[in-house]
Image: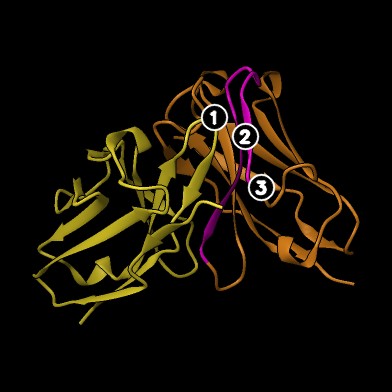
Chain colours: A orange, B yellow
Amino acid sequence: EVQLVESGGGLVQPGRSLRLSCAASGFTFDDYAMHWVRQAPGKGLEWVSGISWNSGSIGYADSVKGRFTISRDNAKNSLYLQMNSLRAEDMALYYCAKDLDGSIVGARGFDYWGQGTLVTVSS
Amino acid sequence: QTVVTQEPSLTVSPGGTVTLTCASSTGAVTSGYYPNWFQQKPGQAPRALIYSTSNKHSWTPARFSGSLLGGKAALTLSGVQPEDEAEYYCLLYYGGAQLVFGGGTKLTVL
């Protein structure tokens, strides 16, 4: 059974940093690209970032480019999102999602999603 | 700034048929945008329904189908069930590891 479990969310002050993790199981992690998607309270889904199986291809939404960094550790079956210079508008539930492909990030889409981890940005 | 547009809300009667659409500000949506569709119910994570325009996941009910229609991606629900009431999101691929979600369609079954 595929499982994606996010962690690392919490309350953080504007301008500070936070690192999210996603622990994957039930599939061969290093065969697939992975993504982060967020959802602000009462709002729609926003794609944040994606990374290919070997970290050779990475993409970011314009809203987070230069502030967020996606990475993965295939030996640990884990996906990460380093979030720096956090803003109030970054407050959201952050989901990790599994891609259907390994190399071409997002070209085929997603299949499995985690339950999300909540990031609250407030002073 | 690429914008993906969906109908904000639609209403359908049980047993009826409804089509949701997904348009791109860059022009006609083609198969090269690999349209995906997701369903999200309140308090739940999104669930994948359709990938690469019209392909269903193993768990996708047969009443859901995806297509291209008049320059847009489309999701058609035939024989709508009460449990289909949910928010539906499309996702388009713009190349170079860039993806954009639509704003979502709130489907009411009434």
Q: The magenta stretch spans which residues?
A: A44-62
Assign a secondary structure to mark 2. Answer: strand
Mark drawn on residue A109: none
- The residue under label 2 is A59
Instruction: Assess whether mark 1 and mark 2 are in contact (beta carbons under 8 angstroms).
Output: yes
Q: Is residue A83 above or below residue B76?
A: above
Residue type beneath disc 3: Asp
Task: Name the residue tied to disc 3.
Answer: A62
Residue type, label 2 = Gly
Specify the subunit that label 1 lies on: B
Left or right placement of residue A112 versus residue A61 in this view:
left
**Mark 3 and mark 1 residues within 8 Å of each other at the beta carbon:** no
**In the image, residue A53 lies in the stretch drawn in magenta:** yes
Q: Residue furthest front?
A: B27
Left/right placement of residue B101 relative to residue B62 reads right
Q: Disc 3 versus disc 1: distance between alpha carbons?
A: 13 Å
- Could one spot residue B70 in this view of the protein? yes
At horizontal 8% and vertical 70% (from top left) the residue drawn is: B15
Would residue B66 be visible to someone looking at this image? no
Residue B60 position (above or below residue B12)? above
Q: Secondary structure at mark 1?
A: loop
Between circles 3 and 2, the one closer to the viewer is: 3
